[in-house]
Image: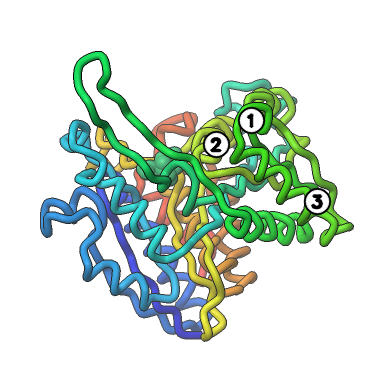
Amino acid sequence: MELNVLILPGDGIGTEVTREAVRVLTHVAGKFKHTLHIREALLGGVAIHKTGSPFPAETEQMATSADATLMGAVGLPEFDKAPPDKRPERGLLGIRKTLGVYANLRPVRAYKALMDSSPLKNHLVNGTDMIIVRELTGGIYYGTPRGISGSGAEERGVNTMSYTRAEIERVTRMAFELARQRRKKVTSVDKSNVLETSQLWRKVVTEVGPAYPDVELEHLLVDNCAMQLILNPKRFDVVVMENMFGDILSDEGAVLAGSIGMLPSASIGDQKPSGVWVGLYEPVHGSAPDIAGENKANPLGAIGSVAAMFEYSFKLKEEAAAVNRAVEEVLNSGRVTADLRPKGTPATTEQVGQAVCEAIAS
Ligand code: IPM
Ligand code: MN
């Protein structure tokens, strides 16, 4: 198969973890005899530095023509005080919107080898295996009106949360389809006791449900869900929610996995005429400028995102499984970065990438 992949290393540790993810991508493509075409482009702070824009037109064009995009992370402290449209994060929101990747899949698994890395008790975490499906191209992240106006005591910030039926329906269907291939349970998360957007959300999800009679549907309020994630994570299979709730709850989910460096993500849109599904793949973690350049960031979230790319964009299940198995093997071997609190000397970012390739063998 021809694999046209765009690489956007981005900022901070993004470049380091992406290098290892590309190492694994190249290795697996070679092993399974795929032809890999890699191009690289600018996104985020590095793009602002070089072009003045966090999402340059050239990157936009290259992303649109690629089959799939692999991203590191964006964000640099020097832009902390910049207005939202001059920040690296705006580049990420831009590419998500341009690609139309409306469903962000964030799997959360508790690996046996990492049980002690989680601050939670083993018996609570053990057996956790869920996918958070976060709506990614709508809601308060994109709603208008937005902005800051006025002055003095009347200076006011405004954001707008809005959802259409169509936006809710398509991400809900994605959640049900995923659940069908898993433990057949969908939990929909909202704040329908307060918000109109959530009332519509719950209504639409409830209406989609009967099309999937084999899948159980439950509704949970977002505050309660935040608590249940810690009290009883095993009850969750596929958990679907709007954009900002998903942003917040997926970081909480990271605690179950032992380290946020472990979490991959896949953002999926529609199927292209070629049969490939549009996808943007990125680890859930940020650019971690405090440890950038030190070769100690955990690349497994980025590497897991390569597995997700094989699975969701190219439908290459065997290749995806090979990467996931290798990640598990490396975890068991203890050749892991400092965030996972290994016994003895931690491995470097690069060593972990190499170890994953070795575990896949040739
Ligand atoms: C994430 C990040 C982004 C988000 C930021 C960097 C814009 O936190 O992917 O979870 O809020 O979506
Ligand atoms: Mn986030």
Q: Residues within 10 Å of mark 2 (few under 14, many from 20)?
A: some
Relative image position of residue 129 (x, y in whole percent) = 70, 43
* Image depth: mark 1 or mark 3 in front: 1
Say which of 37 and 195 sits in front. 195
Give the CA distance from mark 1 to mark 3: 22 Å
Say which of 166 and 258 sits in front. 166
Q: Mark 3 is on which residue type?
A: Arg
Give the CA distance from mark 2 to mark 3: 23 Å
Relative image position of residue 332 (x, y in whole percent) = 59, 43
Q: Mark 2 is on which residue type?
A: Phe
Q: Residue 281 falls in which quadrant of the image?
A: bottom left
Q: Mark 1 is on which residue type?
A: Val
Which dot marks residue 164? none
Q: Residue 254 falls in which quadrant of the image?
A: top right
At 56% from the left and 56% from the top, the residue drawn is 103
| Earlier sequence position, callout 1 versus callout 2 | 1
Q: Which residue is mark 1?
A: 222
Say which of 195 and 320 sits in front. 195
Give the CA distance from mark 1 to mark 2: 7 Å
Q: Secondary structure at mark 3?
A: loop
- 163 to 253, vertically: above or below: below
Relative image position of residue 124 (x, y in whole percent) = 72, 26
Q: Secondary structure at mark 1?
A: helix
Relative image position of residue 234 (x, y in whole percent) = 75, 35
The quarter of the rendering in which ligand 2 is drawn is: top left
CB under 8 Å between discs 1 and 2: yes
Q: Which residue is mark 3?
A: 183
Q: Which residue is mark 2?
A: 245
At 81% from the left and 46% from the top, the residue drawn is 217
